[in-house]
């Protein structure tokens, strides 16, 4: 990144009426959470269970090996991570009065923890869990503090995380909200995502403008017209803007 790039991003944020921040796993790496598709990401590693992580997080594996799924899920998906400056920056923008919608592929809940209110979680959240029998809702502790398969203390039904596993469809209402937010925005910031995971990656097609900024460790090859691509860590780039020092 250089001063010219930072200035252009800062001015775009300042002048925007409606901002959508579309973020992937790279947004949370500065909080100590591994991403998925980088060289050191989870998908390039073999889990200790002898299977790829993508298999362990599939609907079919959840149904066929529920006990092992939860052993894996508690160890690798439930985290005590805290928000980093990327999350905090977006929350500050919203608190300042900017119209900011965060569309995230992450399930860690760090945007809400930082203070963002307008968050659309495409893949659900580890912080929401529900009984498959009676529908009662539970926070993350029902899974975190359990052994084996967590069960509902009221009816005894099995509890499932409200996250979208591989082979499962996205929630239609969530998808609709994301599409509307993108269509109404005049600035789209895409950050920390490879744009290779479908259907989430196609959602930038619903942004009708050309005011698109990409922040990522590696340059992305995208077919949309992009205003600017900035390479680097998202939190560090936002901090370098000195946006709130004015």
Image (tube, grey):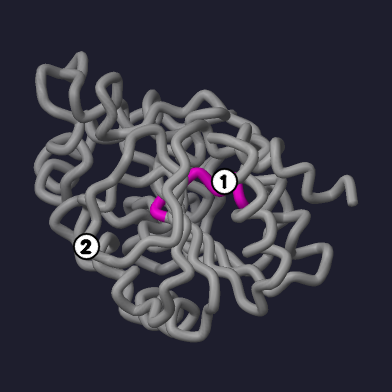
In the displayed structure, does residue 16 sit left or right of residue 94? left
Picture residue at 52% right of the left edge, 61% below the top:
21
| SS for dot 1 | helix
Q: Main secondary structure of the magenta part?
A: loop
Asked whether residue 110 is drawn in magenta, I would say yes
Pair 2/1: label in front: 1
Task: Give the percent coordinates (x, y) of residue 131.
Answer: 39, 59
Q: Nearer the viewer, residue 14 or 52?
A: 14
Question: Does any portion of residue 112 appear in the rendered image?
Answer: no
Asked whether residue 66 is drawn in magenta, I would say no
Q: Nearer the viewer, residue 56 or 6?
A: 6
Picture residue at 33% right of the left edge, 62% below the top:
132
- Residue range highlighted in magenta: 105-111
| SS for dot 2 | loop
The residue where tag 1 is placed is 5
Task: Give the percent coordinates (x, y) of residue 115.
Answer: 73, 54
- Going from N to C along the chain, the mark reached first, 2 or 1, is 1
Determine the image quadrant of residue 46.
top left
In the displayed structure, does residue 168 sit left or right of residue 23? left
Vertical arrangement, residue 28 with respect to residue 89, above or below: above
Picture residue at 29% right of the left edge, 74% below the top:
205
Determine the image quadrant of residue 6.
top right
Residue 223's mark?
2
Question: Does any portion of residue 6 appear in the rendered image?
Answer: yes
């Amino acid at each position: 990144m250089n001063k010219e790039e930072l200035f252009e991003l800062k001015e775009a944020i300042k002048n925007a009426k409606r901002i959508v921040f579309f973020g992937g796993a790279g947004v949370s790496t500065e909080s100590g959470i591994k991403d998925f598709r980088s060289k050191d990401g989870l998908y390039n590693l073999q889990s200790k269970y002898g299977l790829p992580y993508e298999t362990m997080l599939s609907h079919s594996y959840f149904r066929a090996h529920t006990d092992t799924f939860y052993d894996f899920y508690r160890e690798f998906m439930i985290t005590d991570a805290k928000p980093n400056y990327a999350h905090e920056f977006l929350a500050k923008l919203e608190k300042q009065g900017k119209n900011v919608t965060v569309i995230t592929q992450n399930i860690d809940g760090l945007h809400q923890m930082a203070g963002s209110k307008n968050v659309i979680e495409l893949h659900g959240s580890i912080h929401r869990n529900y009984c498959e029998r009676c529908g009662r809702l539970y926070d993350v502790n029902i899974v975190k503090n359990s052994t084996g398969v967590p069960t509902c203390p009221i009816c005894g039904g099995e509890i499932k995380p409200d996250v979208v596993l591989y082979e499962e469809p996205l929630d239609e209402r969530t998808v609709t909200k994301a599409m509307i937010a993108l269509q109404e925005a005049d600035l789209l910031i895409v950050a920390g995502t490879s744009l290779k995971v479908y259907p989430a990656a196609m959602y930038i097609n619903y942004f009708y403008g050309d005011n698109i900024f990409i922040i990522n460790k590696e340059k992305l090859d995208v077919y949309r017209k992009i205003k600017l691509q900035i390479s680097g860590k998202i939190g560090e780039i936002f901090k370098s803007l000195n946006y709130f020092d004015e």
